[in-house]
Structure formats: structure tokens, C-alpha cells
Amino acid sequence: MKDQAREWLCPARSVAVLTGAGISAESGIPTFRGAGGLWREYRAEDLATPQAFARDPKLVWEWYDWRRGVIAQAQPNAAHRALVQLERRAPEFTLITQNVDGLHDRAGSARVLKIHGDIWILRCSRCGREHQDCRASIPDLPPRCACGGIERPGVVWFGEALPPDVWSCAEHAASRADVFLVIGTSAVVYPAARLVDIAKVRGAKVIEINIAETAASAIADISLRGAAAEILPELLA
Ligand code: OAD
């Protein structure tokens, strides 16, 4: 199956990739679902919502602050680096990520469509001002804007719209792809998971890389089972 995947990938004119938390798992960043997915007793769905933030901004921030600390200690792994190589090699290449950790940027990917935002951006919930804040730990939670409003992480929460310009680039790339790679995502969060369907319907070969079966496995042309940091470099060798 790996040989077949290589045969599709090598000559592909247009390649699009969707990554999820699993690609950063080997960098030591916990995924959201499955073993180790809980923080204290909370699931991502309990915290990553506007309602949770309105109810208890300090609690939601404590979770993000913890994740920021973990991410700050982490390094991109061989899977992130392999996608940098693929970007240089494919005539047309689009990297779409659900991850907010910034590891694709740190690995050297030139263009990353961050459909769920960026954990290192803070946005004022009153005046909307955005700025980058790369401190691993924010001393006083929740952080406040100069206008006095409470700042929130610059990420997309459940129930919120995806950034429209970023999303339309992602849809466009999925619909043009000859090969669509789905890497380290459970493919249960929409609309992100819809990109897999769009690519498939528009004729792309869908190649999944994941340690386990997922919601995308049934429509993938090939499912490669194993860690992304092992399999991706092998595909490009
Ligand atoms: P999930 O936590 O739902 O899924 C992680 C996937 O990675 C699972 O399918 C695992 O089997 C797989 N996996 C784990 N380790 C792996 C490895 N070493 N190599 C390959 N695969 C591995 O994460 P996402 O699908 O990214 O959204 O979750 C989607 C969204 O839900 C996130 O962006 C976040 C979350 O709530 C928001 O916060 C809006």
C-alpha cells in the first residue's frame, strides 16, 4: 500500500494535506480524543466554546495556558519536516491544519492554512484587537486588553465560524487536489472533515495516515496505519 501511495504522490501535480493533532503527538502534545485527551476532568468540547469562556474565562484560559506551556517545550517532528520537503517538491501544494500549535511554521512550512486559528494570537473580546503573545505562561489569567476587555485565544471554538478567507482557500485546494493526504486527525470535527469529502468527490486519491481507524478511513483510497513521523518520511523517500 505504501508503494501505491508513493506512485500516486510522486507525479501528483496538485497535493493538499489536512493535518490534525496526531501529527504533533510525537512532539509530545496530547491529542484531544483518545487516551490522554482529558485535561483535569474536561474534554475539549467542554472548554473550547464561547459559552464556557463566558461562564469561566479563567478556567478556559488555564487550559490554554497549560497547552501553550506544553507546546512551547515541543519541537517539530519528522512528519512536520517531511511536509516541508513535500511543499518544495510538489508543483502545487496546500497545507491545511486544524492544529493551533504553530509546529508546521516552526518546521519551515512556508504557507499554512490554519483553519482553527493560532494559540499564540490573543484577541480582545471587547474591541477585537489582535496581537501575538508567545509567552509560554501568562502570569495573570485571564489576560486583559488595554481597553479593559478580556482577551481570548485566537482560535476557533465549537459553534464559531471558521475564518472565511482561510476556509475558502482550503476548499479550493481540496477540490483541485490530485492527491489529498489526511494525517493524524479523527476527522469528526466539521467543517474541517468535509475537506476529505470534497477532495474525494472531486477525484483526488485520498491517502490517510493514522495510528487508528477514523471517520475518514471508509472513504480513503489507502489507509496507512502507523505514526505519521515514521510513515510520512518513508512516503517521500
Ligand atoms: P483528535 O484528538 O480528535 O484526533 C487525533 C487523531 O490522531 C486520532 O485519530 C489518533 O488516532 C491520531 N494519532 C495519534 N497519534 C498519532 C501519530 N503518532 N501519528 C498519526 N496519527 C496519530 O484531533 P483532531 O482530529 O485534530 O478543535 O481534532 C480536531 C479538532 O477537535 C481540533 O482542531 C480541536 C478539537 O477539539 C477545536 O478546538 C475547535
Image (cartoon, rainbow, N blue to C red):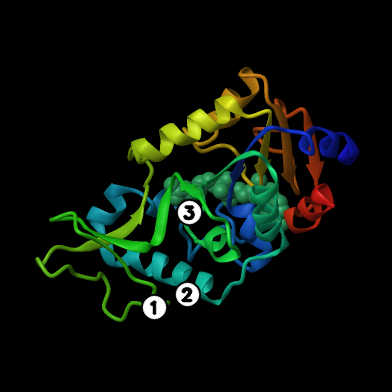
- Residue at left 14%, top 55%? 126
Q: Residues within 10 Å of mark 2 (few under 14, many from 20)?
A: some
The residue identified by callout 2 is: 69
For residue 24, the mark is none
Instruction: Tell me the SS state at disc 3.
Output: loop
CB under 8 Å between discs 3 and 2: no
Identity of the residue furthest to the bottom in this view: 139
Per the model, the C-alpha gap separating discs 3 and 1 is 21 Å
**Tags 1 and 2 in contact by the CB under 8 Å rule?**
yes
Q: Quarter of the image for the N terminus: give it.
A: top right
Mark 3 or 2: in front is: 2
At x 61%, y 26%, the residue is 199
Q: Where does the image place residue 153, in percent across and percent down from the top left? A: 33, 60
Q: Nearer the viewer, residue 58 or 187?
A: 187
The amino acid type of the residue labelled 1 equals Ser
Q: Is residue 77 visible?
A: yes
Dot 1: few (<14), some (14–19), or many (≥20) neighbours within 10 Å?
A: some
Q: Is mark 3 within 8 Å of ligand 1?
A: no
Q: CA distance from mark 1 to mark 2?
A: 6 Å
